[in-house]
Amino acid sequence: MRIFLAEWRKLRRPAFLFGTLGSVIFVTGLVTSLLFLLIDAETGNADRGNRITREMLQLADGFTIGFRSAGGLLGLVALSVFAAQTAQEYTYGTLRNLLVRQPRRIRLLFGKYVAMTSFALLSVIVSAITAIGLALALSGRAKVVTDNWFTNDGYISFGHSFVNVLICTIGYGTIGMLLGLIFRSPISAISIGTAYLLVVESIISIAWKPASNWMPGNLLSVISSGGSPIGVENAPTYSQALLRVGAYLITASLITGTLFKRRDVAN
Amino acid sequence: MNTPAIAVNNLSKHYGDVLAVDDASFEVPLGTICGFVGPNGSGKTTTIRMLLGLIKPTSGSGSIIGNSIGHPEKYLKEVGAMIEGPAFYPALSGLENLKVLAKLGGIPFERCQELLELVELGDRGADKYKTYSLGMKQRLGIAAALLPNPKLLILDEPTNGLDPAGIQEIRDLLEKLSKDGVTVFVSSHLLSEIEMISKYLVMLRKGKVIFAGEMQELLHRSKPVIIAKPTSKNSLPFLAELINKTGHHAVIENDHVKVEAEESFAVRLNKMAFESGIVLAQLTPVRASLEETFFELTGGAE
């Protein structure tokens, strides 16, 4: 608990907290706004030029589509936060201070991870509020009937979406933490992480399509969308994606833990 | 026998082919101030990191207050440390930085402000760390090291960046802590400071311990010197020759002759000079300083 609270003293600094939550509001707001404002656009209103029709938005889960669509971007924010919070301890040299006060390395790492996970949870909550608020605000203008939204089916759908987006966000964050620990530099960790997830995975997927079913970024998108990513054919099922992501996260955690426990702190 | 504050036995650390610390063995008794000196790259910081559990030794063993360095969780709650200068989060205030460490170590927050007052940062605690001067950062590092009210304080270059008044304050603080029973293990390039405050000394050279023991023992090891200055510079060669005839080694330096001899030789030298018609304006036995001894043992400037 002490490690968790100590980590939060760093996470709660105003520039960082409001800056990160501001970017969460911005990306969620952008995705949700485009969904409603471009509803009749020929060029599409969703990721990769796909169209989310008025009828789809009027379904019970319609108000969560914007929130779900922002999952990947929320993940990138989480990746950056986890990577920066981990790598900065090396660049500032503060890790040695932390380890002198808390020499149980795995406990320290776990406490930091739980604190960052709770920060990811806060980001997802803010994103959900933003997405739903904007969906409600823009539904009239987009002539979307909201009668099915706030029903039992709607609430259940929201619950599923929330858990899926949270898993996706934490998944990206865990990758960020591993990269932060490997590269020990926030800039390297974030740039390599985002370049891999946004560019390298896409290139590999184009070059060899079956590989996309095993790529962590693609699998997290499947989870975020609840198993049916818009415009993606032959994607793995939700349970397949969950299983594969679980295996990756366990592997990432083992590598992270081993590196953190065994590596000399020489800076 | 009392448990030593630090005991190190045949401790070594290799980085590939590079031997950073080579079979180091020394002890630091409880309640003393022990200086830790050596040229750059001699392995001081590596040794300190091994003592704090940050680096795993390649071989050898050590203990801090009776606990093996293999289990730092058993002793670090009683140890305060500042390693290789202060390291804090630039965007947090000085006080907030201390609170992060206090929370981690289960130390009451009230201690943070107390320590800021102690290191004369009481009125700057709310300012961001990145706005601090080098001296202020150093003081904050010392405050952080004092957070757990330590039995053993390990400081790596604590006076870096401090002005003479600041150095004096740190010296007074360390002496006060020592009087209160805290063992202080301090590395510094300011050998005169180390000489002034330390009772014990550990000296490293190329990773090896070349001296570990009481400071006085080291200073007495160095050859005593007598400075003899005649009233006339013309007498210098004759005076040096006279001394060399007695079997002592004399060299001319500027306006005086430097003689390697015990203090007792001064009486004989004075008589000899007088009888040879040389009037001495100065005849002073001199003990080597730590700096001179350091260069003598390490064989060069740092």
Image: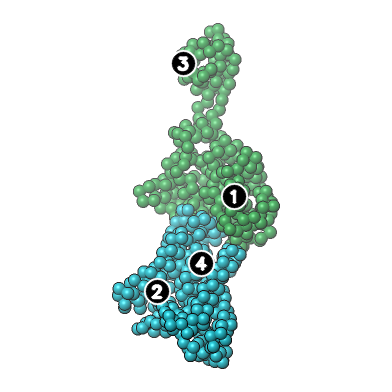
Residue at the spot 53% in from the left edge and 40% down from the top edge: B189
Quarter of the picture containing the N terminus of chain A is: bottom right
Q: Nearer the viewer, residue A165 or B184?
A: A165
Residue type (three-letter) at the residue carrying disc 4: Val
Residue A168 in picture, x, y percent from top left = 46, 76
Residue B244 image label: 3
Subunit bearing disc 1: B
Residue B88 can be seen in this image = yes
Q: Is residue A265 above or below residue B258?
A: below
Subunit bearing disc 3: B
Residue at the spot 54% in from the left edge and 15% down from the top edge: B269
- Comparing labels 4 and 3, the label whose residue is closer to the camera: 4
Residue B137 image label: 1
Q: Are marks 4 and 3 in contact (CB under 8 Å)?
A: no
Residue that mark 2 sits on: A216
Residue at the spot 36% in from the left edge and 51% down from the top edge: B16
Q: Are marks 2 and 3 in contact (CB under 8 Å)?
A: no
Residue A81 image label: 4
